[in-house]
Image (tube, rainbow, N blue to C red):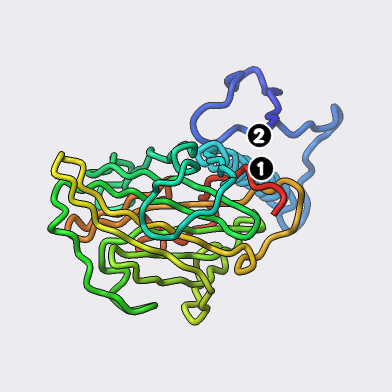
């Protein structure tokens, strides 16, 4: 963002605080304010004041936009699967090991910005027809998982332990598709509009997931969700190389904790996870 550094001698040479001072208004050398009936000088002062206020507001908006873009400079690269992926809740194909996992998350609830209580890994693959997500959710009290909903779009899926995905195929920060899975493999999905302010839970995509709870006995107990989403169920502009908006996260019911990859302000409450203005970037999709 380019900010003019022109300032009068009585003003600081650099912007201070959150707002940048606008450049002074240049007046003609022979300018003289003229009093006239009806308070003309007052109108002139009011006009100048309004101009200064407008410049301050525009500067603040530009700075806020730039700050938002800096804060969400996150990306993950999907790896092409050269061999078929068996959807069974077991991430044992070689391609899964080649995919670099997402491991950095922050809390939305209850402590905004705090690190997660439990570690999570998310890997991404793709082939000609499908986009795959592999979630590994570690839990040192695996027997306390909350998972009692098995129905598709059941009302309790979001109250169970679960993982979620938000995809913005147009990468326009306005709309997207949301997917959620619990440890029993129950599915929930919806369309997202108006940057997350409007949700359509009547939308039902054709997609699959398998989940599996693993009690390892070595302190690495976890549950896994393996997700397969057909590209035919998503909306995007076909290109040789694609870049989409993406967010992923996890909810731990007993802790009432919600974590997310690309941070979203807590002020959005229960709709924070649906915000398409706060997405990271999914890269690496080619020839699909």
Q: Residues within 10 Å of mark 2 (few under 14, many from 20)?
A: many
Residue on which disc 1 sits? 55
Q: CA distance from mark 2 to mark 1?
A: 6 Å
Q: Say above or below: 126 vs 162.
A: above
- Seen at 59% across and 45% down, the residue is 82
Precedes in sequence: disc 2 or disc 1? 2
The image quadrant that residue 184 belongs to is bottom left
Q: Quadrant of the N terminus?
A: top right
Residue 177, given in percent of the width and then of the height, sits at 54, 65
Q: Say above or below: 256 vs 202.
A: above
Q: Residues within 10 Å of mark 1 (few under 14, many from 20)?
A: some
- Seen at 29% across and 59% down, the residue is 212
Secondary structure type for disc 1: helix
In this picture, residue 283 sits left or right of residue 99: right
Residue 43, given in percent of the width and then of the height, sits at 71, 52
Residue 102, given in percent of the width and then of the height, sits at 43, 40
Residue 22 marker = 2
Residue 202 marker = none
In this picture, residue 96 sits left or right of residue 269: right
Secondary structure type for disc 2: loop
- Seen at 28% across and 42% down, the residue is 119
Q: Say above or below: 255 vs 233.
A: above
Q: Quadrant of the C terminus?
A: bottom right
- Of the pair 202 and 24, the residue shown nearer to us: 202
Cβ atoms under marks 2 and 1 closer than 8 Å: yes
In this picture, residue 265 sits left or right of residue 31: left
- Of the pair 241 and 155, the residue shown nearer to us: 241
Q: Point out the residue furthest to the bottom here.
A: 202
Q: How many marks?
A: 2
Residue 101, given in percent of the width and then of the height, sits at 43, 39
């Amino acid at each position: 963002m380019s900010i003019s550094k022109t300032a009068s001698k009585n003003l600081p040479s650099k912007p201070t605080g959150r707002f940048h001072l606008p450049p002074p208004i240049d007046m003609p050398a022979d300018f003289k304010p003229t009093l006239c009936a009806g308070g003309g000088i007052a109108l002139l002062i009011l006009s100048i004041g309004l101009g200064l206020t407008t410049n301050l507001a525009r500067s603040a908006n530009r700075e806020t936009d730039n700050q938002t873009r800096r804060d969400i400079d996150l990306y993950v690269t999907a790896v092409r699967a050269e061999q078929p992926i068996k959807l069974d809740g077991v991430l044992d194909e070689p391609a899964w090991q080649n995919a670099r996992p997402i491991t950095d998350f922050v809390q939305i609830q209850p402590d905004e910005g705090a690190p997660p209580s439990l570690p999570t890994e998310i890997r991404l693959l793709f082939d000609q027809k499908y986009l795959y997500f592999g979630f590994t959710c570690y839990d040192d009290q695996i027997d306390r998982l909350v998972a009692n909903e098995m129905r598709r779009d059941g009302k309790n899926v979001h109250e169970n332990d679960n993982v979620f995905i938000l995809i913005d195929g147009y990468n326009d920060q306005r709309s997207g598709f949301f997917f959620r899975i619990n440890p029993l493999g129950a599915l929930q999905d919806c369309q997202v509009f108006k940057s997350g302010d409007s949700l359509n839970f009547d939308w039902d995509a054709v997609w699959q997931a398998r989940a599996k709870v693993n009690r390892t006995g070595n302190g690495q107990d976890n549950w896994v969700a393996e997700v397969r989403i057909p590209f035919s169920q998503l909306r995007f502009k076909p290109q040789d190389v694609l870049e989409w908006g993406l967010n992923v996260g996890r909810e731990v019911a007993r802790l009432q904790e919600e974590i997310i990859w690309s941070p979203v302000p807590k002020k959005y409450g229960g709709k924070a996870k649906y915000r398409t203005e706060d997405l990271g970037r999914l890269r690496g999709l080619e020839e699909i």
